[in-house]
Image (tube, rainbow, N blue to C red):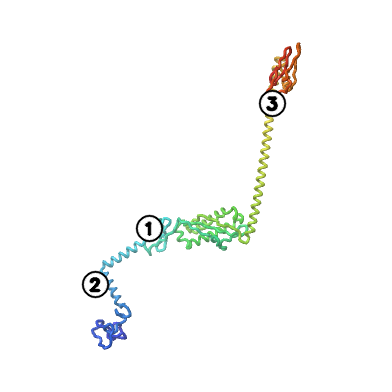
Amino acid sequence: MPWNDNANPGPWGTPPSGEGGDKQPPKSSGPQRGGGGPRRPGGPGGPGGPDISATLDRLIAQLRGLLGGAGGPGDGIRPGAVAAVAGAGFAIWALSGLYIVQPNEEAVVTTFGAYSRSESPGLRYHLPTPIEHVEKVAVTSLNRIDVGGAAGADVPEESLMLTGDENIVNLDFSVTWRVADAAKYVFTVRDQEDAVKAVSESAMREVVGKTTLQDILTTGRGKVQTQSAELMQKTLDGWGAGVSVVEVQIRSANPPQEVVAAFREVANAGQDAESAVNEANSYRNRVINEAKGDAAKLTQSAQGYREQAVREAIGEASRFSQILTEYKRAPGVTRDRLYIETMQRVLSRSNKVVIDGKGASAPIILPPDVFRPKTATARVEPQAEGGRVVTPSPGAPQ
């Protein structure tokens, strides 16, 4: 039975007048709702809500009116309206290809999934989806990966490594890297960060396996970091990953927790030994320098004495030669002069007074200053009648 067959009212009763046919509903003496008997649930005032078919008819009529025609079965759709809608849709689709590449990014454009080109920062355009697709990659930003766990949360599976002298070291380090080639970075490796982390851990284990524990704990960290970074870069370049390793930094390197106390004692003993060696070297250097100074002082003193003795000998020889020359010219005068100079030199250090009394007729009275000790500033030259008083002074001939 069709839903709009009004001949058979069905369980909802007879429809009101004007709905499907010219038949008038039978009169009834009982009460009627809505002035015409019971309505169908789809009616405007029924309990079932609005009529769905009527709503669809109205939507279809509105769409036909938008595209052209009055909505009747014989009306057609205007071609101009269809072209306008199609043009607007195409314009929206075409403009969806505009995109902006930030200064720290590089865009990788693919055509149907295959690499097409790379774009630099700025306003760019690509053919809209599904023809071309764009993936932006940050090429100037520095990325960091921690291997061995973060501070206070070590991961033993990553941090425990075997050294070259068959010891175990608990080593945590960080790797700083950036994207060098955006196309290779996108297409070569699927999980880039996991790949960089795996390569970093492998390279560090290889370098640590060739280094002694003492070097890793003390002065060999810089060498380990440099060698690890070089090995990481070589491996990533071999893969064509498009990644550049900037820096490898060892955050902590310690022996396993169970033997930390023993290693500290060994380190303290090594420091004490080094301190003792430094003190011994300091004492040796001080003693050697003092001995060298004393030796140089004695050598210089001996050289000065030798120079003095040689020059004095040369001077005495020259003086003797000059006296000999004068003696050959005047022997008598030279002998008297030598005698006087000798007596002057001898008597200048004596308090004795020599008096020549030949031909003296009266006694000679000497002043009391003559018998006083001689000083450097006092000089006595007494004079007497009838005789000569000789009081030689140093450096002055009589």
**Foreground tag (1 vs 3):** 3
Residue matched to label 1: 124
> Which residue is outermost to the bottom?
29
Q: Sequence-wise, which precedes: disc 1 or disc 3?
A: 1
Residue 18 pos. (x, y %): 24, 81
Classify 204 as above or below 299: below
- Name the quadrant containing residue 102: bottom left
Task: Identify the residue position indicated by label 3 in the image.
Answer: 312
As helix, strand or loop, the secondary structure at mark 1 comes to strand
Instruction: Residue lying at the far left in this picture: please name it.
Output: 22
Q: Amino acid at mark 2?
A: Ala
Residue at image point 55% right, 55% down: 225
Q: Can you tell which mark lies on residue 223?
A: none
Q: Report the residue at 30% width, 79% height from top.
A: 45
Residue under label 2, please give it: 70
Q: CA distance from mark 1 to mark 3?
A: 103 Å
Q: CA distance from mark 1 to mark 2?
A: 46 Å
Q: Residues within 10 Å of mark 3 (few under 14, many from 20)?
A: few
Quadrant showing the C terminus: top right
Instruction: Assess disc 1: are there few (<14), some (14-19) or many (≥20) residues with their C-alpha within 10 Å of its C-alpha.
Output: few
Please, what is the three-letter code of the amino acid marked with disc 3? Answer: Glu
Kindly indicate the quadrant of the structure image that contains residue 331. Answer: top right
Please state which amino acid type lies under the numbered disc 1.
Answer: Arg
Where is residue 285 shown, x and y percent of the image?
66, 43
Using a 10 Å C-alpha cutoff, classify the residue at mark 2 as few (fewer than 14 neighbours), some (14 to 19) or many (20 or more): some
Depth check: 114 or 127 in front? 127
On screen, residue 163 versus residue 183, left or right, reads right
- Quarter of the image for residue 269 reads bottom right
Q: Nearer the viewer, mark 2 or mark 3?
A: 3
In-front residue for pair 8/260: 260
In the rendered image, the quadrant that contains the N terminus is: bottom left
